Image: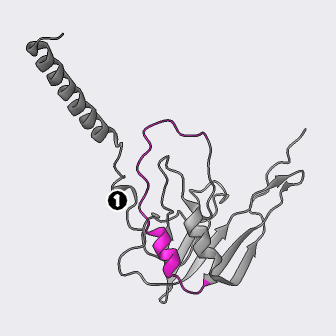
Amino acid sequence: MLGPGIRRRGAAALGTLVLATVLLASLTGCGGSRPDRYRPDAQIVDGVGCLATDEPWSGGTSPPSPRPGRVPEGFVPVAVYRCNLGGIIGPQGVISPSTVDRLEGDLDPLLKALAQPDDPEWPGPCSAIGIVAPPLWLIDARGRAVQVVYPQDGCGLPKVGPVSTALQRLTVVDTVIRPPADPVEPIKP
């Protein structure tokens, strides 16, 4: 049987351990979502630019891309541009063109999907995978555009499901096909 002094010291040690665990969890992001500073408002620019020199698929021939981010308050889009980037490498070099689709319709479901908060940051290891989500641009009636970002899961990957579902409800009204930019050397076996 333990004496009263040992029980009090054990209870104090347990209390200290619980407090330290809560403090450590709050400092490491466990249980909390990332603040909005990780997704600032997108920079408003004149026109859509699916290819930019700072993107690996651009071939270095387009102007740098503006800062992507959330839809800025007061920005009222009338259409979406989805950049389907080519670059499939085959025996003859780059053989897949890129396309740019203009989609129109009820944009509210898409705006709601894009406005979803990021998931809480996952404190453990994440899979060594990547998700390629097509870049999206929103354009307003004045021709101004923003490049938007997808909400992220706990490992920083884009949550494409809700955004893709909303895009499927829109109508493709125009598609521009761009030939492969700069051919690359064919892969030699």
Residue 11 position in % (x across, y down): 16, 23
Quadrant containing the N terminus is: top left
Quadrant containing the C terminus is: top right
In this picture, is 119 found above or below 28? below
- Assign the magenta stretch its main secondary structure: loop
Q: Residue at x 72, y 78 (%)?
A: 176
In this picture, is 113 found above or below 185? below
Q: Residue at x 47, y 64 (%)?
A: 68
Q: Is residue 2 magenta?
A: no
**Total label count?**
1
Quick check: 9 left or right of 151? Answer: left
Q: Is residue 124 magenta?
A: yes
For the residue pair 18 and 122, the one nearer the viewer reads as: 18
For the residue pair 10 and 162, the one nearer the viewer reads as: 10
Which residue ends up furthest to the left in the rendered image?
Answer: 5
Quick check: 168 left or right of 141? Answer: right
Residue 76 position in % (x across, y down): 43, 84
Secondary structure type for disc 1: helix
Identify the colour scheme used. Answer: one colour
Quick check: 126 left or right of 117? Answer: right
- Figure quadrant of residue 106: bottom right
Give the magenta range: 104-128
Q: Which residue is mark 1?
A: 36
Residue 159 position in % (x across, y down): 54, 59
Which residue ends up furthest to the front in the rendered image?
Answer: 1
In this picture, is 142 found above or below 163? below
Q: Residue at x 21, y 33 (%)?
A: 19
Q: Residue at x 24, y 36 (%)?
A: 23
Residue 2 position in % (x across, y down): 16, 11
Amino acid residing under circle 1: Asp
